[in-house]
Image (spheres, rainbow, N blue to C red):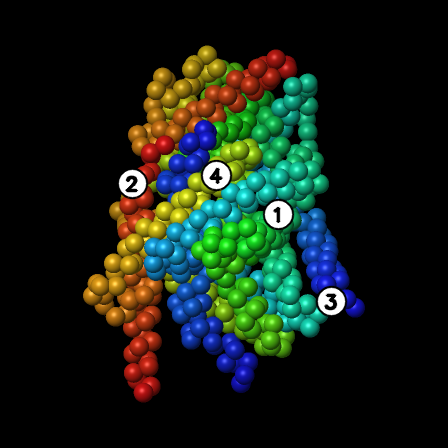
């Protein structure tokens, strides 16, 4: 056989076998990965909406707010387009939670915001993921900083240097969290309130 | 006997971290705790054993000119498998090691062993060589992680030794601590092997 | 996030070598004299900028639409390896002077984890095309900066009286630690 032809054939065969094996592994693991992620988010919802025993998922969609199976959605889509409704053991709606994103100092910061059904004010927020500097920007995870958002409603500005005290030495991170909270809050609140 | 020699070579004489000084990025980046170091080491060892064995099997089939791309494909396949499996079954660990799992592909140890050893030796010897190198890498990472965790967070394998709120050398878990710890460890390893050589002679 | 912030962040604040621990192998291997440090740094920067463009196109026009995210690692590393080859051939043909200066470093670049690392990071940050290229430029220049600083210090180190076990890589790591500590001062800059 021609030598250069042989090179191409061998490489192509190796690449094809490898792609085949990987798609098989991906097929089995992706289901588990998505389930894990959905479960992790659900348990975070329990945290930001105290008293919740059951979570129902609504889709953040301009047209309709319907119950949806997150497993059918792509991972990225899942993180930002769902609204989680927290219900207590008597099936009363306690509040709703949603994910907001903004670019911080080292990358994307993702926060989960929990809002009370009755007062429409923030109950608590949780930083889901970030890549901020250890020792400085990562203080956005702390209870002290997260507490500064409690009780805010869409009527508040929710801006650093206005009604939120930024962390000294971590202005970019603080601003990003405030932006993520504010923007997602306004968007979701309009949908959620309008959709009822 | 040959197999035994192949195995121990990676543990000390040609230890990837302390002797060959390769594969340094994960060595420094993930060793903020002993557990992280251990898991990263084992993940790399798995890739090393599998890719060394497979490359040794394929060594006659792969034309010489395209061997590097072919090795890279084989290695990248195993790395992606590790990445996916870890993501599915060990999500917490996966999020800590993060970027450094896919980066096993460019870990010079893996490609280096494929080129220098697996492409010339039998399957069995290549796998054993991979095992030795992998474990050599693992113990180096675990040791580094343990030192940094002990000084930086006052704990070892997650068990805390200091009272809550006691101040620890936080810098040890940050990047500068990683560099400095590894530098000092290198010096200690050099001293030990100098002593051993003197004793032998 | 403005382009300038991305550049500054990749260059200084999150310096690839000293803060993110990417590209340590060439950082230790090719930092013995300033001239080769500059050559290696610029060659890497060049490949990074090109890789930023190519990997961005692959991710958002091939892998995402076809639902093949699991082939990311495989395709990125192959593309980087192929690109390094092309750059090498291109330089060889067009600019022999540049080839002589950078040529020996090019094969080393394939296994520089800073390149694969920054390509994957660019995807994770979902940068736009322009942002990704700027990110690549910042990462490359940051790598060059760290490499040249290190080489400058190591050149002077030849005359220092270092305890025997620390000689070679040992002292280099400790210097890198001090440099990394200094770069910690950039935190909060942006």
Residue that carries the numbered disc 2 in the rendered image: C185
In the image: residue A163, left or right of residue C63: left
Residue at (68, 26) in percent of width and height: A67
Find numbered disc 2 in the image and state the secondary structure of the residue it sits on: helix
Mark linked to residue C135: 4
The residue carrying mark 3 is A3
Residue B103 horizontal side relative to residue B71, left or right: left
Q: Which residue occupies 57% across, 40% down?
A: C53
User: Residue at label 1?
Assistant: C72
Q: Verify CB contact (< 8 Å) between mark 3 and mark 4.
A: no
At label 3, counting other C-alpha atoms closer than 10 Å, the crowd grade (few under 14, some 14-19, many 20 or more) is: few
Relative to C63, is A191 above or below?
A: above
Q: Give the distance between the C-alpha atoms of the residues marked 3 and 1, in whole angstroms.
A: 30 Å
Query: Which badge, 1 or 4, is on the more N-terminal residue?
Result: 1
Badge 4 marks a residue whose secondary structure is helix
The chain ID associated with circle 1 is C
**Which quadrant of the structure image shows residue B150?**
bottom left
């Amino acid at each position: 056989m021609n030598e250069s032809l042989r090179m191409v054939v061998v490489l192509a065969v190796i690449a094809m076998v490898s792609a085949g094996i990987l798609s098989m592994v991906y097929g089995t693991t992706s289901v588990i990965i998505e389930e894990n992620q959905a479960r992790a988010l659900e348990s975070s919802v329990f945290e930001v909406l105290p008293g919740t025993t059951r979570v129902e998922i609504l889709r953040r969609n301009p047209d309709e707010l319907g119950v949806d199976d997150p497993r059918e959605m792509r991972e990225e889509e899942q993180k930002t387009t769902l609204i989680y409704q927290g219900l207590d053991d008597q099936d009363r709606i306690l509040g709703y939670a949603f994910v907001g994103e903004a670019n911080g100092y080292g990358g994307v910061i993702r926060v989960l915001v929990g809002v009370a059904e009755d007062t429409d004010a923030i109950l608590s927020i949780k930083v889901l993921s970030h890549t901020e500097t250890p020792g400085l920007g990562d203080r956005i995870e702390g209870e002290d900083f997260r507490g500064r958002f409690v009780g805010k409603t869409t009527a508040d500005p929710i801006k650093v240097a206005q009604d939120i005290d930024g962390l000294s030495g971590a202005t970019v991170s603080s601003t990003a969290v405030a932006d993520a909270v504010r923007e997602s809050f306004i968007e979701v609140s309009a949908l959620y309130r309008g959709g009822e | 006997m040959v197999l035994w020699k192949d195995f121990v070579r990676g543990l000390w004489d040609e230890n990837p971290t302390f002797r060959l000084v390769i594969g340094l990025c994960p060595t420094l980046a993930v060793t903020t705790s002993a557990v992280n170091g251990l898991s990263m080491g084992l993940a790399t060892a798995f890739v090393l054993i599998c890719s060394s064995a497979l490359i040794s099997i394929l060594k006659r089939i792969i034309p010489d000119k395209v061997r590097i791309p072919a090795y890279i494909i084989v290695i990248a396949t195993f790395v992606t498998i590790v990445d996916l499996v870890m993501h599915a079954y060990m999500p917490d660990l996966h999020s800590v090691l993060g970027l450094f799992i896919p980066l096993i592909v460019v870990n010079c140890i893996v490609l280096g062993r494929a080129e220098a050893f697996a492409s010339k030796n039998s399957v069995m010897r290549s796998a054993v060589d991979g095992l030795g190198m992998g474990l050599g890498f693992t113990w180096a990472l675990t040791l580094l992680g343990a030192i940094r965790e002990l000084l930086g967070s006052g704990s070892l394998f997650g068990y805390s030794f200091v009272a809550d709120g006691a101040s620890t050398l936080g810098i040890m878990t940050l990047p500068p601590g990683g560099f400095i710890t590894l530098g000092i460890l290198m010096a200690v390893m050099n001293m030990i092997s100098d002593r051993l050589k003197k004793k032998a002679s | 996030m403005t382009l300038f912030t991305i550049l500054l962040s990749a260059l200084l604040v999150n310096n690839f070598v000293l803060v993110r621990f990417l590209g340590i192998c060439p950082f230790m291997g090719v930092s013995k004299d300033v001239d080769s440090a500059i050559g290696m740094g610029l060659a890497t920067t060049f490949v990074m900028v090109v890789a930023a463009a190519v990997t961005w196109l692959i991710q958002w026009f091939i892998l995402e639409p076809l639902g093949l995210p699991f082939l990311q690692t495989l395709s990125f590393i192959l593309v980087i390896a192929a690109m390094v080859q092309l750059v090498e051939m291109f330089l060889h043909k067009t600019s022999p002077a540049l080839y002589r200066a950078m040529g020996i470093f090019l094969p080393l670049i394939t296994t520089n984890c800073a390149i694969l690392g920054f390509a994957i990071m660019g995807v994770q940050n979902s940068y736009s095309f322009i942002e990704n290229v700027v990110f690549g430029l910042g990462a490359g220049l940051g790598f060059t900066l760290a490499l040249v600083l290190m080489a400058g210090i190591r050149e002077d180190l030849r005359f220092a009286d270092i305890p025997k076990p620390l000689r070679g890589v040992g002292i280099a790591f400790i210097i890198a630690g001090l440099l990394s500590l200094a770069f910690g001062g950039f935190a909060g800059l942006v």
